[in-house]
Image (tube, grey):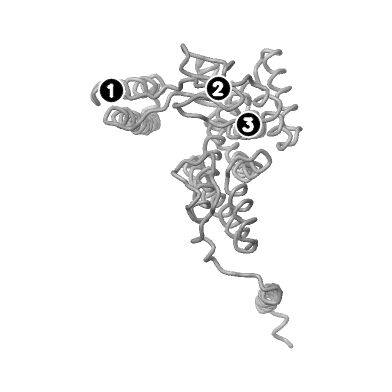
Amino acid sequence: MVFLRNQKIRGFIFQLLSVIAVVAFLFYIGTNTMDNIEQRGITTGFSFLDSTAGFSIDESPIAFQETDTHFRVFIVGLLNTIIVSIVGIIFATLLGLIIGVLRLSKNYLVSKLASIYIDIFRNIPLLLQILFWYNVVLKAMPSSKDSFSFFNGSFFINNRGFIMPDFSFNSTSWSILGGMLLAIVTTIIINRWANQRQEQTGETFFVLPIGLALIILMPVLGYFIGGANLQLKYATLGAFNFTGGKVISPEFLALTFALVIYTATFIAEAVRSGIEAVQTGQKEASASLGLTPYQSLKLVVLPQAVRIAIPPIINQYLNLVKNSSLAAAIGYPDIVTIFSGTSLNQVGQAIEIISITMAVYLVVSLLVSALLNYINHKMKIKER
C-alpha cells in the first residue's frame, strides 16, 4: 500500500469515495420516495400543468381566467414574484444609500434619526412588518367613498389600494417610452465617455445635470412627436367602488413597503461600512485639492465605498428575492401563494410543485448573483 503515501493519490481516492457516498445516498432517497409514492397510489408527473386551474387570480400582470391551466398559474405567480422583487430592489437601494450616507452626517439629529431607523426596522421580524403595513396601516384606511385624493382627484388611496390613472398604449405612449429609453442609453454613453476622459486628462465632466435634462426633455419631445394624444383613463367613484384607472392592491403595497424598509437597513449599514473603510487620507487629499464635501463624497469616497459595499449588498438583494415568498401571509398572488398553495391543494402533487418552486428561486437567485458579480468585477480597481 505504498501508493497511499502519495498525497495526490490519497486525495483522489477520498474525493472518489465522497462522490460515491453522496450518489448512493441520493439514489437511496429517490428510490425510497418513489416506492412510497407507488404504494400509496399517488399520481406523479407534470401532466397537471395542462389541467384547468378552476380558480381566479385577482392581481395578474397578464390575462387570466378560471379556465386557464396550472401552467399559466405558474407564469402569473412567477411574474408577480419578479415584479415585487425588482421594485423592492430599486427602492431598497435608493433608500439604503440615502440612509447610509445620512448615518455618517455631522448633524447629530440627522445621524441619530438614521441610526434609530436602522435599529428599529432591522430588529423587527420581516413577517411582522408585512402584517403591520397590511393590517394596521392599509386596512385602516378609509373606504372608497372617503378616499384620500391627490393631484386634483387623479390619485386615490383607500383600504382597497392605491388608484392611479391608467393609459392605453398608442403612438404617443410608445414615443414617450422610446424617448425615455433613448435618454437612458445616451446618458450611459456620456457617462462612459466622461470616465474615459477623466482617466486620460484628469478633467471631470458632470454627467448628472445632463442626464436629468435628457430624461426630462426626451419623453416630453416624444410626447409631441407621437401626436400629443396620451389616452389616460381616470378612475371614477361608483356606488361602492372605483371603476377604471389602475389599482395597486394593498397586498402589493404592504409587501413592497416591508421588503424595502427592512432590506434598506442592511444596505444602509453596508454603505456606511464601505464609506468608513475608505482611508482618511483619501478624504483629506480631496479636501486639500479644494473639493467641496459633496464633490469629495461623489468623486472620491462613494466610488471606493461602493466597491467595498457591493458584495454584502448582493446578499441583501438575494435575501429580498427569497423573502418575497412571505407574500403568502397576506395573500399576494406570488408563486408560493397561488402555485405552491392553491394549485398544490387542488392537484396534490407536492413533490413536483415544490421542486419547481424551489428551482425557480434557485435560478432567479443565481441570475441576480451572476449579474451583480459581473458588475462587481467591472467596478474593481484596475491596477496599472
In-image side of 210 versus 250 (left or right): left
> Residue 260 sits in which quadrant?
top right
Point out which mark residue 285 bears: 2
Percent x, y of residue 164: 47, 24
Above or below, 168 relative to 107: below
Q: Is residue 56 in sight in this rendering?
A: yes
Percent x, y of residue 326: 66, 42
Q: Earlier in the sequence, mark 3 or mark 1?
A: 1
> Of residues 336 and 224, which is closer to you in this image?
336
Q: Which residue is mark 1?
A: 229
Above or below, 262 relative to 283: below
Describe the element under mark 1 as helix, strand or loop: loop
Q: CA distance from mark 3 to mark 1?
A: 34 Å
Q: Amino acid at mark 2?
A: Ala
Q: Cβ–Cβ below 8 Å for labels 2 and 1?
A: no
Percent x, y of residue 290: 50, 14
Q: Amino acid at mark 3?
A: Ala
Q: Which residue is mark 3?
A: 254
